[in-house]
Structure formats: structure tokens, C-alpha cells
Image: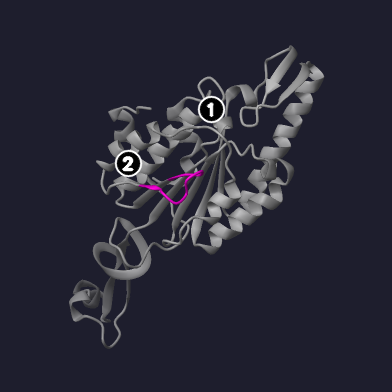
Amino acid sequence: MMLDGAFYEKLSRIRLQMGHKSSMNLAGNRKSVQKGSSTEFSDFREYMPGDDIRRIDWNAYGRLDRLYVKEYMEEKEAFVSVLLDTSASMDYGIPPKSELACKLAAALGYLGLNNMDRVLIYDMKHMQSPFVANSGKRGIMGLSVWLDSCVFEGTVDINEAVKQLPAKGPGITILLSDFLQEDFLEQSAETATKILRFLNYRKQKPVFLHVLAGEELQVDLTGTKNLIDKEDKSMLRITLDASSIGIYEKNLKAYTGSLQEQCAKAGAFYAICNTSRDFYRLIFEDLRMLYDI
């Protein structure tokens, strides 16, 4: 799971958008709405008794004959939490969905590290022991090693995993999953809404990255096949023809549309991440609305 230096160089020019104010207790590279004493200029306002006279803009006074002070943006640290679905279903596809999910986690983790945010990567099966990336760009090496060690097997409960997310402060929470979980498949709107409400309550900007294999998005198999569930090993024998494929595609469109609709209502970001898609175009085009360019 390696990304080249040219990719990271291009990635270093952007950063993740945050939907909530950043943490008020740690210094970082985020700009909070609270005015502070950093060197980045924000705005002018009229002088009030008690203001620091060193902030008076004497040039403005000379032009307007009124006292104005300069305000600056305070730089604050934000939290970037990435929750990785490591269930067996993520190991499906050529290339497997797990490979794309890890590459996305590495890229988005790098964005946080490059902007001096706190980056935590969670295996949804082991929420109590996240990988805490070291600050700065060097942390990406440790992150890559951790991602390479992830084992995609068994099942996960996405809703339960999100509930175990510690309350660390405002930031962005990214779910990387194929969302092929019974609760989602049977009650997608209700399950997604619960998660979105919880994350908004925790002052998180929710991001749903729906990782699907090219074979799942565009079925080109025909004939009678034995479909084996990668998680519970159950088998279903079906005949794939134009009619059955049409029904599948209709249901898939309804399912992804439901998730997208719930995310839109909650002000969250949703995107389908296709394993067949060029990774550069996926990051820099499909996910561009995630970034401050």
C-alpha cells in the first residue's frame, strides 16, 4: 500500500474542511473562528476601550480619522478520526476494497498530519486501541505500516463502532466502509440517521466514503453462479441474466441514493469510491468538495 512522493507533494497543497470550530486547547494549523494573536490577518473592527493599542491601525486612522484595530485568526488543532471497516466483505474485488480503503486512509491521514491536526485511525473491530499518528509529515510512515498490518476478516458493527468513538473535540470523522451490514441494508435511512446525529452531537463533520468494487457497481457475470458470503460463508445459487442484473442495479441505486440523501440532510459528505477508478482522479476530483484548496 504505497503512494509515491509526487502524489504526496500534490496532496500537501490542500487540506480537509472542518464543519465545526477546532479545539480550543491545543495549537495547530487550523484557523478557529475565535480571534487570537496569530500572525494571520482576519479583519478590522472599531477600537473599544481596553483593546491592545498595539493593534491599532494608524494608517486607517490617518485616512478615516477613526480608530480601528486589527483582528487575527487563532490557529487551533483539529481532530481527524478515520474509522476503517475491516470486515471480511472488504476483502472482495480485484483489486480488493480493503486496498482502496487503506490508500484512502493514508491519503486523508496525511492531509491531517500535513496541517498539524491530530490524526487517529480506528479499526472498527478494535475501537479501544486506535493508531495515533505522530505529528508532522513523518507520521505517514508509521500510519502506512499500521494500515499494512490490518486484517480484514469477520464482521463489524458500524453503528456500535461509532458509539465507541471517544469525545476528544471538534473535527472530522471519516467512515471507510462498503456498508454491507445488515442494519444498513435493511434500514439504511434509520441507521445512517442515528450515526449522523451522534457525530453532529459530538461536533464532528461526518464523511461517508462508500467503498465498492467495480464488480459490485457494474455486474458483467452471466449464467448460474454460487455466491458465497465472505463473512458467514453462506451460499446462494442464482442465475444471472439481464432481468436479475437489472433488479440488482435498481436496488443498489436505491440503497446508495438513500445514504446520499441522509448525508445531504445532515450536512455530511457522501461519495462512492470505486476500486476501478483511477486513484488520482478519485482523490483530486471525486472528493474535491472535502478540501480547502
Query: In the structure shown, which secondary structural element does the residue marked by tag 2 occupy?
Result: loop
- Which residue is nearer to you in this view: 194 or 151? 151
Q: Quote the CA–CA distance across marks 1 and 2.
A: 32 Å
Q: Residue at x 39, y 62 (%)?
A: 22
What residue span does the magenta drawing correspond to?
Answer: 122-131
First along the sequence among labels 1 and 2: 2
Tell me the crowding category of disc 2: few under 14, some 14 to 19, or many 20 or more residues within 10 angstroms, Cα based.
few
Q: Residue furthest right?
A: 243
Residue 266 makes an appearance in the image: no
Q: Residue at x 61, y 27 (%)?
A: 230
- Which residue is nearer to you in this view: 66 or 154? 154
Residue 6 against residue 289 in the figure, above or below: above
Residue 55 against residue 190 in the figure, above or below: below
Q: Is residue 125 magenta?
A: yes
Q: Residue at x 70, y 49 (%)?
A: 189
Tell me the crowding category of disc 1: few under 14, some 14 to 19, or many 20 or more residues within 10 angstroms, Cα based.
some
Q: Position of residue 134 (x, y in %)?
A: 28, 47
Q: Which residue is mark 2?
A: 13
Question: Which mark is drawn over residue 91?
Answer: 1
Question: What's the residue type where badge 2 is placed?
Answer: Arg
Q: Quadrant of the N terminus?
A: top left
Q: Residue at x 40, y 48 (%)?
A: 130
Q: Position of residue 144 (x, y in %)?
A: 34, 34
Q: Quadrant of residue 252?
A: top right
- Which residue is nearer to you in this view: 121 or 64? 121
Query: In the structure shown, which secondary structural element does the residue marked by tag 1 occupy?
Result: helix
Residue 20 makes an appearance in the image: yes
Q: Quadrant of the C terminus?
A: top left
